[in-house]
């Protein structure tokens, strides 16, 4: 029995040292590939892109115009990914709430709101990102419905069963999947939708490849194997209803980005090698909360 005078319990910080490091990274992050693309239409995405690229942008003779066209094309591919995810959140009404776990500078929640009219709560461990995203929502005049919070997505403190849909767009590699899916299952109402787009390592390859390890080091993350997603969902009342291997669809984005001198971050070839040697996959998983 624990009594009020029991002082043996270890104190657990609200945020682990690792999570503090992740927050430091995103508080400091100002990559042109994230900011210049977002500036085009004030939709800030911090994920990659999918679909065939318009390669004619590279043939533009004027270097400045070529740069602009490449930037716009990469943004189009990133936005296509946000739209794909939003299209899988199920039928939503303007009264419904959705939860954007690891929301970055906020583009995903805005995309979902524009598509469904729903309320959105985005959560990021970076105070700077949450402030930036709230300012964007205010400027757009949707801050009554789209809100961003500086919180841990594993322990949001939000109301149980209050959400019709939730997702992670490239943010699952920062957390333990069991803890994450337990929180989604808690927040989602029965029959609610969960969707994730993520890079994962391919179990058939074996363990994490050199390239996967380089990506982990670059972003301070821990890419999970494909199998772990399904195991952790099964343990947390999330039943997959749709799975798509987006690996092929992800390659044009990286091919174009590696040729965008003004936007490269240095990780482009590693992603292409990882996809091409079969060690890494880009996946969409949609699940029902039962
Ligand atoms: N989903 C966004 C951003 C992806 S980048 C988009 O599509 O644009 C990864 C994001 O995960 C960052 O915003 C980072 O702050 C967030 N993140 C990482 N660990 C987190 C945690 N424990 N709780 C909340 N957010 C976290």
Image: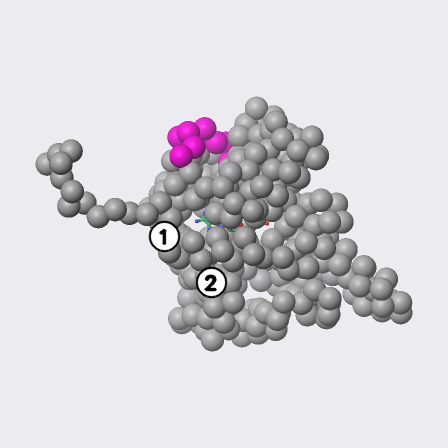
Position of the C terminus by quadrant: top left
The color scheme shown is one colour
Quadrant containing the N terminus is top left
Along the polypeptide, which appears first: circle 2 or circle 1?
A: 1
Q: CA distance from mark 2 to mark 1?
A: 14 Å
Residue 276 rendering spot, x and y as whole percentages = 57, 72
Can you identify the residue that label 1 sits on? 16
Reading the image, the residue beneath label 2 is 220
In the image, residue 192 sits, relative to residue 202, either above or below, namely above
Quadrant of residue 262 within the rendered picture:
bottom right
Front residue of 243/93: it is 93
Identity of the residue drawn at 60% across and 29% down: 145
Q: Which stretch did the figure color magenta?
A: 157-165
**Residue at (59, 69) in percent of width and height:** 267
- Does residue 185 appear to the left or right of 142 in the view shown? left
Residue 43: % across, % down = 68, 45
Whole-percent x and y of residue 245? 55, 58
User: SS class of the residue under badge 1?
Assistant: loop
> How many marks can you see?
2
Identify the image quadrant of residue 70: bottom right
């Amino acid at each position: 029995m624990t009594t009020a005078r029991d002082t043996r319990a270890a104190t657990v910080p609200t945020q682990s040292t690792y999570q503090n490091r992740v927050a430091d990274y995103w508080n400091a992050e100002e990559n042109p590939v994230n900011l210049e693309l977002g500036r085009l239409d004030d939709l800030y995405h911090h994920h990659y892109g999918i679909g065939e690229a318009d390669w004619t942008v590279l043939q533009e003779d004027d270097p400045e115009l070529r740069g602009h066209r490449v930037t716009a094309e990469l943004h189009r591919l990133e936005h296509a990914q946000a739209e794909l995810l939003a299209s899988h959140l199920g039928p939503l009404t303007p009264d419904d709430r959705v939860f954007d776990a690891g929301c970055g500078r906020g583009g995903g929640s805005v995309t979902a709101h524009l598509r469904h009219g729903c309320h959105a709560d985005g959560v990021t461990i970076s105070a700077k990102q949450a402030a930036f995203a709230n300012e964007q929502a205010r400027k757009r005049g949707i801050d009554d419905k789209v809100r961003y919070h500086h919180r841990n997505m594993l322990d949001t403190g939000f109301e149980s069963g209050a959400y019709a849909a939730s997702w992670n767009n490239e943010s699952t590699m920062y957390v333990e999947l069991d803890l994450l899916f337990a929180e989604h299952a808690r927040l989602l109402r029965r029959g609610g939708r969960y969707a994730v787009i993520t890079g994962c390592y391919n179990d058939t390859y074996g363990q994490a490849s050199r390239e996967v390890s380089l990506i982990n080091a670059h972003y301070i993350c821990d890419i999970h194997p494909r199998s772990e997603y399904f195991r952790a969902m099964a343990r947390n009342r999330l039943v997959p209803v749709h799975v798509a291997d987006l690996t092929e669809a992800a390659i044009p984005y990286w091919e174009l980005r590696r040729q965008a001198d003004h936007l490269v971050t240095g990780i482009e070839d590693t992603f292409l090698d990882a996809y091409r040697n079969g060690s890494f996959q880009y996946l969409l998983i949609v699940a029902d909360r039962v």
